[in-house]
Amino acid sequence: MPEFQEFGLNVQHLGLTDEVLAHAELTKDPLYRKIPQDRLAYYVDRSLQRGREAAQACRGMSIRELYHREGLRYEITDRSGTFHQLSLRAQIDFNQTPPEVVIYAASLRGMADAYRAVMSPGEQAQRSSSPQDDELERLVDIHLAHEFFHYVEYRAGQFTNDLLEPVEVFRLGRRLVKRSGVVQCSEIAAHAFCKEMMGLPFLPNVLDYAFLIQTGSLSEEDFYREVEGWKSGHAAAL
């Protein structure tokens, strides 16, 4: 297993700006290679902007207060979140009225080391409870915030990808053109909302990479190469 304390120190100096981590999220979209290079920054910047603006409207409230204000139900459970061999950490059910969020705490406990590794010293200094309890509570709140943003999109009747220009995915002659939205933009916006709402040092998708390193599924060297690729891709789009 990698020496995670060392990784925690190094990650602070990798230049993981919001734009770089948003670009990392964008690469997961099935349409990523269909996006013209000079338009990549558009999808990154507009998605981050929407998430930040939504967070500004919630300033001064905790995420659990927001759930109470909106009358949203959430459940924190230890039951398995496994679905078709995928381990879910949280999900929102829009078929419920109002929508209901389920947080799978059992899946989050394994991320405690990852959370600790990317924690800023300033955030550590604000702790008031035991480290283990605090980390799990923060992880729960991060996932509550992420799903709350998707509720905000649902309530508005437009997900972030619906607001942005669709990407051309198929063309036959001049008249037959198929376009589709970039779905991952909604995830970028949710990450930005979560970071602002929770006062995090990075977009929370960095936790996924830290967790993969912790479990040996991703080497630190490969992660550093990924980071350089994200930086190059974002710089080329500017």
Image (cartoon, helix red, strand yellow):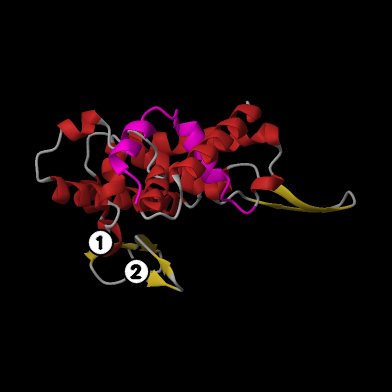
For the residue pair 31 and 208, the one nearer the viewer reads as 208
Amino acid identity at mark 1: Ala
**Rendered position, 61 above or below 154:** above
Residue at which label 1 appears: 105
| Total numbered circles | 2
Q: Residue furthest right?
A: 173
Residue 175 appears left or right of 223: right
**Rendered position, 18 above or below 4:** above
Whether residue 17 is visible to the viewer of this picture, yes or no, is yes
Q: Residue 128: x and y, percent? A: 9, 39
Residue at which label 2 appears: 81
Q: Residue at x 69, y 46 (%)?
A: 33
Q: Residue 154: x and y, percent? A: 44, 54
Q: Which residues are magenta?
A: 1-30
Question: How many angstroms separate mark 2 from mark 1 (CA)?
Answer: 9 Å
Q: Secondary structure at mark 2?
A: loop
